[in-house]
Image (tube, grey):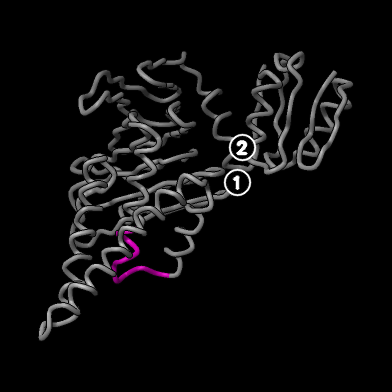
Amino acid sequence: MSRATDVEACAATWLVRREEEHWTARDEAELQLWLQESAAHRAAFWRLEYGWRRADRLAALTSDARKGVDAGIGTRRVRAALLAACLVLATALGFWAIREPGSAPAMFTTDVGGHRLAVMSDGSRVELNTASHLRAEIGRRSRQVWLDQGEAYFEVAHDRDRPFVVHAGDTRVTVLGTKFVVRRDEDKVTVSVVEGRVKVEEAGGHAIDRASVITSGDIALSQGDSMLLAPRSEQRVEAQLAWRQGRIDFDNTTLGQAALEFNRYNRRQLIVSEDLSDLRIGGSFAAQNLDGFVRMLRDAYDLSVTQTGDRFTISS
């Protein structure tokens, strides 16, 4: 599924939710955060909203022309038709789970450098890392979560009758009760298991092409039509969880990769010159202490640091 299709489906979900009676001020704030994340989000939402408003105007004209008929009937019918169209769109794209009695879709977002804990109605706990967007549908018969972007740590409450499924693009992670991390960088998805076991499936179109079961210490990376299982390493999995304590751990990491990781957590950005991108570094750093990291590079490696606005350029 393309990213554009993903965004269109999410916009349809937001538009439908906003028309429901239980829409709250917090829901509105989360919608605004989602809109602020990218121009693509705003364009998709406004396009659907424009169609919604045109339906209102068309219904009003229809109602005025029909003397003696309740003026609200036409409006309600056209709006209901558009609502149904949005639901069909979202359902066809796999992003609108069937609403069950007692369940309601929930959306959770974090800004750059943000961190958020969400407790699901089934007792499962989800921690969102920086710049993440997640949707959850916890019902009586199913538990589904969509990670649209970013990274999340899951502690899933055991329920054999309701497998917990995480969708990240074309990757699907199914568990009964365990602890694991899912990170989505556009079409690249990384699944790291802390405890228990999960099934990672790659879907091409509507059919499942491949599946692997991974356990504690395992890491699965999928991108496009490829899936790689990394050698078991509990230490590496723990390092990937450092963000839960507000830190980033590097072990024989290239400076180029380290800069990209710091850039996930900070609006100020690191730029590394090409001749230094393969320099190997190690250590544990506060994710948002960009100044401290830059000082370390300057003092320990005798590198040159030039600041221009919100950019630090590292060169030899």
Residue positioned most to the left = 68
Which residues make up the magenta segment? 15-24
Tell which of 209 and 215 is nearer to you.
209
- Residue at disc 2, secondary structure: helix
Left or right for 134, reference 97: right
Find out whether residue 23 is within the magenta segment. Answer: yes
The spot of residue 197 in percent (x, y) is 34, 28
Main secondary structure of the magenta stretch: loop
Find out whether residue 205 is within the magenta segment. Answer: no
Tell which of 75 and 135 is nearer to you.
75
Instruction: Give the residue at mark 2.
Output: 264
Point out the tag, 2 or 1, that comes first from the N-terminus.
Answer: 1
Residue positioned most to the bottom = 68
| Label 2 close to label 1 by CB (< 8 Å) | yes
Residue positioned most to the front = 65
Q: What amino acid type is highlighted by mark number 1?
A: Val
- Residue at the location (64% across, 23% down)? 257
- Residue at the location (31% across, 56% down)? 105
In the picture, residue 156 is in which quadrant? top left
Tell which of 98 and 4 is nearer to you.
4
Could you tell me which quadrant the C terminus lies in?
A: top right
Could you tell me which quadrant the N terminus lies in?
A: top left
The spot of residue 254 in percent (x, y) is 68, 18
Q: Which mark is residue 112?
A: 1
The spot of residue 251 in percent (x, y) is 66, 20
- Residue at the location (34% across, 49% down)? 136
Label 1 Cα neighbours within 10 Å, binned few <14 / some 14-19 / many ≥20: some
Q: Height in image: 240 above or below 36?
A: above
The spot of residue 216 in percent (x, y) is 41, 25
- Residue at the location (63% across, 31% down)? 261
Q: What amino acid type is highlighted by mark number 2?
A: Arg
Figure disc tally = 2
